[in-house]
Image (spheres, rainbow, N blue to C red):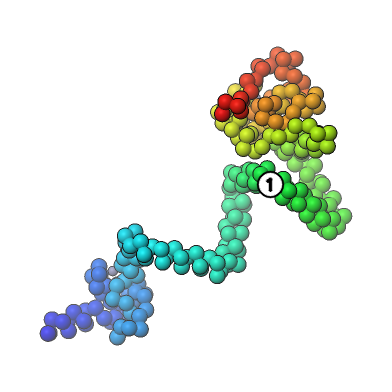
Amino acid sequence: MVKQRETYKKRSAKDGYKTCSKCEENKAVSEFHKSKANADGYNYYCKQCVKNYSKWKYANDPDYRAKIKNYNKQWVIDNRAHVNARAREYAAKRRATDPEYVERHRMYDRRALDRNPERRERNRIKSKEWYFEQGVAYKQKYNEQRRHRYANDPEFKQRVYVSILKRQRAMRGGDISLTGEQWETIIEQHEGRCVYCGCIPQVMTVDHVVPLSKGGAHNAYNVVPSCSSCNSSKNSKMPEKLQMKIPVLTDFEEL
Ligand SMILES: [Zn+2]
Ligand SMILES: [Zn+2]
């Protein structure tokens, strides 16, 4: 009887400290969750022990696991605005500090648009309208930025070039069927190397073996990965004219 009272005393909050009845460590009351059911106002178990227990339960009790998953799902639904704001915050932080993250997400976006050309067209119209609404000064600034990027970013320059030719070609009914996914497969097939010099460039550009300006198609059968310096020295010439190595094309029928 006496012993029990002692145990009780030992475990209740005193001078801001309390002994956890699981790990039996003496911890500050701030290390315990509050509980109205207990005389001293705190849980029997410390926060860490509660956490360990629920972790164990999550791993071993399917019903509990389902309950937690459901609860989390519902929480996300109920706090959509908060979740979206946090995601935006996180993305902005990554964009500001991690160029690889930016590049990766640009690629995801492009791929998603490859799969959904209607959305690309909708986006194009929407952004056109948006720029129109921003007024002339904004448009000038935007064009200035694009000109700067065009002059300094070979990959961007190539994208602009290809997209103009693609548009012209599409209007004439030509083949522009290269998708982002095919392009990545082609890069993989070449182990990320430039087909002409064999380097592994930071910026990989699309080289049209038969140049677009000479009627070559923008499809999987006419493109090879090339570093920007080989690509620009090849320019719109055929590789055999330059005594460059004639690249082996990826055979998509075999894949
Ligand atoms: Zn504990
Ligand atoms: Zn090269």
| Residue at point 34%, 65% (across, down) | 54
Mark 1: amino acid: Asn
| Residue at point 65%, 38% (across, down) | 180
Q: Nearer the viewer, residue 167 or 155?
A: 167
Quadrant placement of the C terminus: top right
Task: Give the quarter of the image for residue 21.
Answer: bottom left
Find numbered disc 1 in the image and state the secondary structure of the residue it sits on: loop
Task: Give the quarter of the image for residue 224.
Answer: top right
Residue at the far right: name it: 136
| Vertical position of residue 88 compared to residue 167: above or below | below
| Residue at point 66%, 17% (across, down) | 246
Residue 26 horizontal/vertical position (percent): 26, 72
Direction from residue 238 to residue 194 in the image, left or right? left
| Residue at point 55%, 67% (across, down) | 77
Residue 89 horizontal/vertical position (percent): 60, 60
Counting labels gives 1
The response on whether ligand 2 sits within 8 Å of label 1 is no
Specify whether residue 98 is in view.
yes
Specify whether residue 48 is in view.
no
Q: Nearer the viewer, residue 132 or 28?
A: 132
| Vertical position of residue 151 compared to residue 134: above or below | above
Residue 117 horizontal/vertical position (percent): 72, 45
Direction from residue 63 to residue 129 in the image, left or right? right
Direction from residue 64 to residue 124 in the image, left or right? right
Question: What residue would you read off at disc 1?
Answer: 116
Residue 230 horizontal/vertical position (percent): 69, 24
